[in-house]
Every structure is written in C-alpha cells, then in structure tokens.
Amino acid sequence: MTSYEDDIVDGILREYAARKLRRYTTEGHWQEVAELVAPSFINTFFEWGEMVPGMKKTEKQIDSKAALALSRFGAIMDSLLTPRNSKWHGLEASDPVLNKNRNVKLWFEDTTRRLFKYRYAPTANYSSQNQQIYRSLGAFGTGPMFIDRLYSMDGTKGFRYKCMSLGNVYISENHQGVVDGFIRRLKLTARQAMQRADWAATLPQQIKDAAEKDPEKRWVFLHCVKPRTDYNPERLDAKGKLFGSYYISLDLKKLLSEGGYNTFPMPTTRYEQDPEEEYGRGPAMQVLPSIKTKNTEKRIILKQGHRAVDQVLLMHDDGLAAFSLKPGSMNPGTVSSDGRPLVVPLPGGNVQVGLEMMQEEDQIIDSAFLVDLFKLLLDDPKIFTATQVTEMIAQRGILISPTVGRQQSEYLGPKIDRELDLGSDMGLFLPMPPELIEAKGDYSVVYTSPLARAARAEEVAGLQRSIERALAVVNVTQNPAPLDHYDWDVIIPEAAEIDGVPQRWMRDKAMVEQIRTARQKVKQAQMEIQAAPGAAALQKSNAIAQGAKQKAA
C-alpha cells in the first residue's frame, strides 16, 4: 500500500479502538436489557460475541411482559410516525410565495408519491427494517438505518434499507451533537467478499485463495464513513463528496476501496440522550429496575403457586411411614385415635398480594412503552363524538410529542434527505419546474402522520368548539352575522391540509373563482327570469298610465 493508504488504515483502526473502549460500559447495559427484554440481541454487542444457530436465549427471562410491551411499542411508533396505509409526510417549497405555485405543488406531490412507491417496494425491505428500528429504539434507545441504492442483477432501480445491529456500529457526533460518522464491522465469507465489484482489484490474495478452497470462511471488514476534511465540490471523484467512505480488511489491515456520499447514509435516531453520551437510552433502559423486579416477583409467585397446588406436608414422626398421594389410596396412621390429623399442609404465602405487586410493575412498564396511552379508546365502550375524539387525540399528542417528536429531526428528516439524493441520482423523479430550479430546489418536509396531525389537532378542535358556540347564537337569534367572523377561504384549505387531504383533490384558487363567477351568473340569470313578469306588468301599467295622461291632455 501507499503511504496515503497506510495513513487511512491506521487512522480508522485508531478510531475503531477508541470508540470500542468508550462504549464498553454501554455494551454491558445493553446486554442486561437484551437478556430480559430482547433475547434475540444477546451476545451481539461484543466483538468476541458469537451467535450459535439455535442457542438458547431466554434462560434469564422469567416474565414476558416487557418483551410484549416492546413489540407493542414498535407497532405504536409505526402507527404514529410512519403508518404504511397512509402518506405520513409531504414536501413543499421552503419559499412561502413559491409554495403557492400550482406547478411546484404538483411536482412535490408527485415526488412524494414516487418516494412512497420506491420506499415500500418489496425489494426495498423498508417495512421490516423500520420496525426493527423502533424495536431497537425501545430496547436500547438507539436505531441506525443504513440506506443505499438497490443493487439488482436485472437493473431494477430503487432503495435498499438495513437496520444495523448496534453491536456492529460505532457512531460519532459533530460539535453540535448530530450523528455524522460511523464505523461498522462486517463479517463476510470469502465468497461474499468476492461478490463486491468495487473490491475486485484490491481484495487481498489470501481472501481470493480462500474463496476457492474454503469459500465459507468468514473475514472481518470495517466500513468507515465520516465528513471529508478535504472536500472539493469541483472534483468528480470521491473527494467531491461531502462524506468519505472507506472499506478496509481488519484481518489483513488493507484498504479495499475509497468512495463517498453526498448525504449521510445512516440516519441514526436516539429516544432520549443523557449528557456526555452519544448513544440514546430507551424505555427498557429507563424502567429496567421495574422489569427486573417483575421477573423476581414472577419467580416467587411461581414457587408459591407450585406450593399451593402441590402442597408441602408436615408429618408426625412417631413411626408414621411414608404414604401415597395417588387417588383412591389408603394411608393408615395419619390421624390420631380421636380423629385429629397427624399430617397437615405447610401454610403458604398470599398469592393475591404478589399478583397485585406484579400489576403495579406492569403499569410502569406499559407507561414507559406508551401502551397505556392507547387503552382508553380501545377499552372504553362509550361512543365518543368527533369533537371528543379530536380533543383526546390532541391531549395524547401533547404527551407524546416531546418524546417521539425527536424522531422527525434525527431519523425521518435525514432519511428523506438521503432518499431524495439517491432518487435524483438514479433519475426516479420528474424534472423540476423552472420556478423550483431557479430556487435551487429548496424544500421543506411537511409531516402528516397521526402524531404530526395530533400536534395540530388542537387547532381543529378549537375551531369546532368556536363554530359550535357561533351556531348556538345563530339558532337563538336567527341572525347569521356571528358566522361572518370566520374566513372560510382560509379555514377550509388549512383544515383539509391538517386532515391529510391530497393537494390534487383540492381545486386551486383560479378554478374556485371560475366556479363562483359561473354560479353568480346563473343566479343573476335566475333572478332576471323571476323578475321578468313583474317588470313586464310594471311596464304595461306605466304605458296605460301614460296613455291616459295623453288622452286627458
């Protein structure tokens, strides 16, 4: 290798060693959470950890409450932020004036439609990996999603998503706390390494030989991505990319390839973040004491339940022989001559108290995983009015937004930026309208997920309450004047936007004006037709009066 390549390899190896050392304690914490909440992640956080197919992983998990809550947490987060059955975000021009241009709005709407098409394509694998992100977020507080273009033998264009295992990813932040770099560890067989076209000229001979003699032998590689310090936008090679990308062989200490990305390829979200920590802390980590307490209580309840069903017997030792507990058996000598039992059960503890203690821990766990927030609408048999439902959603949005609203800035926003960058490079979108090109394509993301709508639902709820009061006044006074205070031309479009109505379903202002003008002309014509008989009679009356005056003269 050249000195340039040696410097890159040495620098990456130093960073790798430093990041491993820094998160050593965190890995132990993750391991403890995995043992009780997410057993599938056991032994995945350590470099020496080896997953043996079929190994037992639930030996320390006495109670499954937390694991079930984690599964529901993933479903809740998915339904709140990224529901598959609806478009949970849109795009618009950052310039409010430009955003009123219909061609620009239609282009953003079409681009959004195409994003969802490629994002949820079967080859993208987004749905399953997105669910893994939420589960990782709930258990360990951190979720890294690697996004790249789809590599297909038939040339199909699209995206490919992969939730990275935390044990194999070491992240780094910039000075503002934004994740802008990572090193991930890959274990590939020699056969898999040979499939990498970008490694064809640099793959070490040892791996090529292994591909022929022992193709399933596994080799360890490192992929390092970080901001370029030598970025030059005028260059067309790797140095013309904002982020440098380097693959090295960890076993042989050799640089395999150097590339780059225009956008950060692995948006990483944190649930909550403590000071001086790069990695987040999830609900499972927050209520780990309750989870451990619940497991201990469950173990005690099981023991007590066994004693209650198969009781411990206390026996008199004066020559009393062992007796049978089989149905129908006879055990002489187990009562005294006066009928007093010589064998009695050992008094047990109060199982009901133990169950109540477990229920208290269940409530804490449900609260941490957001499960309790959604029980009211499901469990309460009452029928709510539309206004009540809107207000309930708004209230829950207030409770949830501070916690999960972070996902929009750390996960969804960077993910959409990455998808737009990839899609533009692959030509997946229509050409921009000239007005947007002049504005350099500057855009903003508009979130329309249930969580985002819940945050704005208070506006609609307040409007509904206000209109109900105004209508009550109108009904009493029979005077429609109170409704004159509402600007319906502003209310209706904005309410439709909050409710997630697509722009293509709404008419633009010019079309609305045409319809109103045509309606006014029809109304005017009808009024003229209705007034015609009266006008003719008046004209006839005037003519008769005029004739009478002339005769009198």
Image: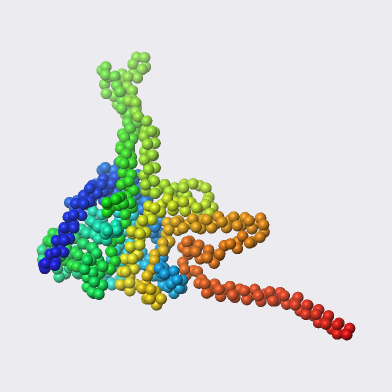
Nearer the observer, 448 or 172: 172
Residue 317 on image: x %, y %:
26, 19
Q: Is residue 112 visible to the viewer in this orientation of the structure?
A: no
Which residue occupies the foreground of this view, 438 or 434?
438
Where residue 353 sits in the image (x, y, percent)?
38, 33
Q: In the image, what residue occupies the spot 36% across and 14% down? A: 338
Q: For the point 83% across and 80% down, which residue is it?
A: 545
Q: Is residue 550 above or below residue 421?
A: below
On screen, 503 above or below 479? below
Please say whether residue 526 is visible from this viewpoint: yes
Q: Is residue 180 toward the left or the right of residue 206 in the image?
A: right
Residue at 28% over, 68% down: 262
Left or right: residue 180 compared with residue 222: right
Extreme residue in the top direction: 337
Image location (x, y in percent) of residue 115: 37, 67
Residue 224: % across, % down: 21, 62
